[in-house]
Amino acid sequence: MSWPDNALTEPAAVFAALAQILYSATDDADVYNAICSAAVDLIPGCDHASLMLRRGNTTVTVAASDEMAAFADDLERATGEGPCLDALETETPQLESDLRTPNQWPEFARQALSKTPIRGSMGFRLLVDRRKIGALNLFSDTPGAFTEDIADVAIVLVSFASVAVTALSRGEDAESLRRGLTGSREIGQAVGLLMGLHGVSSDAAFEILQKTSQNMNVKVADLARDVIVRHRSTLD
């Protein structure tokens, strides 16, 4: 499936694209796979994507865009290092644009270079109620394709993925998630605004929304909508 060029840079277009694929989702696995498919379709330079969740003391790949992404996750578990594993431990996006150069995951890079076409990678942590629960792993076959600017584009999708994983972990089904997509879109936009206004990471911005919603006893989606409205009013 292909998307218009503006889907790569406009949050509203990203969520419109996600809505299309979520409407075909019937269970958790479909939603996870939709997130990985969206990553490949929407993020420039992304050729493979996987979603890894922590379960107890182990990590499980619950979805992958293709066999190569799943194999890359296996390499991370086998070597004990890599973008997804590090993303589980820190809120900072994990970025290596060229695995052929000295990097933070030498053994993973060595095996990825010898066994796969992967040349660049990014990992983003997903949170549920402030608990480290998993990560979205992105891989590129083109050296240098992943940059900090591309990471900023990916954060929009990561924000949605965090909301989706949170909803599913609480027992909400795909239909409930579809109904909440509008709220999720607004949460993603609010996260982006807070990141820019306060110079914080996506995790920190999402925690600001969560904590404020608890203190004010309002839903996160309602608070996100208010953040967007207030921001627009300051621009008028």
Image: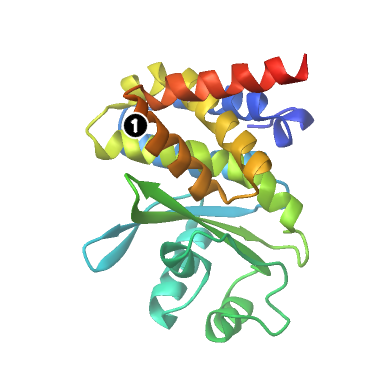
Say whether residue 59 is visible.
Answer: yes
The residue that appears at 32% across and 44% down in the rendered structure is 129
Corner quadrant of residue 103: bottom right
Corner quadrant of residue 85: bottom left
The residue that appears at 41% across and 70% down in the rendered structure is 74
The percent position of residue 88, horizontal first and vertical second, equals 42, 63
Q: Is residue 218 left or right of residue 41?
A: left
Q: Which residue is mark 1?
A: 215
The residue that appears at 45% across and 26% down in the rendered structure is 22
At label 1, which amino acid type do we have?
Asn
Circle 1 crowding by C-alpha within 10 Å: few under 14, some 14–19, many from 20: few
The front one of 77 and 195 is 195
The percent position of residue 122, horizontal first and vertical second, equals 60, 61
Secondary structure of the residue carrying tag 1 is helix
The percent position of residue 145, horizontal first and vertical second, equals 76, 59
Q: Is residue 128 left or right of residue 93?
A: left
The percent position of residue 193, horizontal first and vertical second, equals 64, 34
Q: Is residue 52 left or right of residue 230?
A: left
| Quadrant location of the N terminus in the rendered image | top right
Q: Is residue 112 above or below residue 127?
A: below
| Quadrant location of the C terminus in the rendered image | top right
The front one of 178 and 66 is 178
